[in-house]
Image (tube, rainbow, N blue to C red):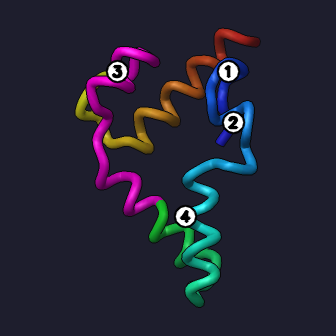
Amino acid sequence: MRAGSGSRLSRQPERSPLRRRVANCLFAGFSLPAAIDAAVERWMGWSIGRRIEREYGIPRDLPYLTGWVMHCAIEAEIAD
């Protein structure tokens, strides 16, 4: 996943919450595929809220991971 040039995720990719969740699952003994699945499942269970909608223009109530992937893809297209 590539974050756009202006996003908070692109400025500190080593601090990505999704990456941390995968790392935590690995530390807990999950295999890499299982850790990724667990992190994705958790993020897909969350929804975009009012603050993210206002700050980044991601429509409210989208699954969190879907919203960020779409946002970053749009930013990448604009940058190219």
User: Distance between the Cα atoms at labels 2 and 3?
Assistant: 20 Å
Disc 2: CA contacts within 10 A as few (<14), some (14-19) or many (>=20): few
Between disc 4 and disc 1, whose residue precedes?
4
Residue at point 52%, 36% (across, down): 69
Callout in the foreground (4, 2): 4
Q: Circle 1 — which element?
A: helix
Residue at point 65%, 42% (across, down): 1
Query: Three-letter amino acid code at disc 2?
Result: Arg
Q: Which mark is residue 2?
A: 2
The answer to the question of whether label 2 and label 1 lie on touching residues, with beta carbons closer than 8 A, is yes
Disc 1: CA contacts within 10 A as few (<14), some (14-19) or many (>=20): some
Residue at point 72%, 21% (across, down): 5
Magenta stretch holds residue 49: yes
| Numbered range of the magenta stretch | 40-58
Residue at point 54%, 64% (across, down): 21
Q: In this view, does 18 lie above or below 7?
A: below
Q: Which mark is residue 61?
A: none
